[in-house]
Amino acid sequence: MPLDKRIFFCHHVRTIMSDTNFFELKGQIITDISNLRVESQEVEIFTGSNRYWLYHLQDCCEYVRIVKIIGNIDDIINREIIFAEEDTGANEPDWHTEYVDESRTWTKYVLKTENASLEFWFLGESNGYYNENVSIKKI
């Protein structure tokens, strides 16, 4: 039986609280990315016909933000995305050594073109009672 790449490449994709999946960016050309910087709480990814908003809907006492960016945005702009992955519940990365609250959720996003890649990590922290996830909305 042939490999269904849609299932294989998005096995971690979470659809709760989201109206779209990050892997939809595969095959598209990203024309711009805004707010992608450390400590940002949201990111907007623009394609020719859509805008994808990655955000956290604040409830009370949780803190969700970008803590690491690996790669250069300019290297993937105006090039076809051949791989798009969201990994919610990613293992704590080796490079993170700071103290975090009782509960934490790592969400890693990866975009790849033929010659470049961009990876960015959200960290959600709380006392364990509040949602720490990142949602995706196609606008």
Image (cartoon, helix red, strand yellow):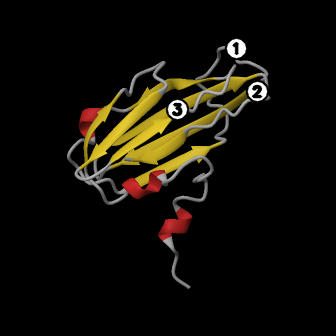
In the rendered image, residue 58, in percent from the top left (x then y), is placed at 60, 27
Look at the numbered disc 3 and give the secondary structure of its residue. Answer: strand
Callout 1 amino acid: Tyr
Residue in view at x 68 percent, y 22 percent? 60
**Residue at label 2?**
103
In the rendered image, residue 42, in percent from the top left (x then y), is placed at 45, 29
In the rendered image, residue 41, in percent from the top left (x then y), is placed at 49, 25
| N-term-proximal mark, 2 vs 3 | 2
**Residue at label 3?**
121
**Residue at label 1?**
99
Sort mark 3 into few (<14), some (14-19) or many (20+) by Cα contacts within 10 Å: many
- Mark 1 and mark 2: Cα distance apart in space: 11 Å
Direction top: furthest residue? 99
* Quadrant hosting residue 77: top left
Callout 3 amino acid: Trp
* Quadrant hosting residue 70: top left
User: Where 87 falls versus 37 (above or below)?
Assistant: below
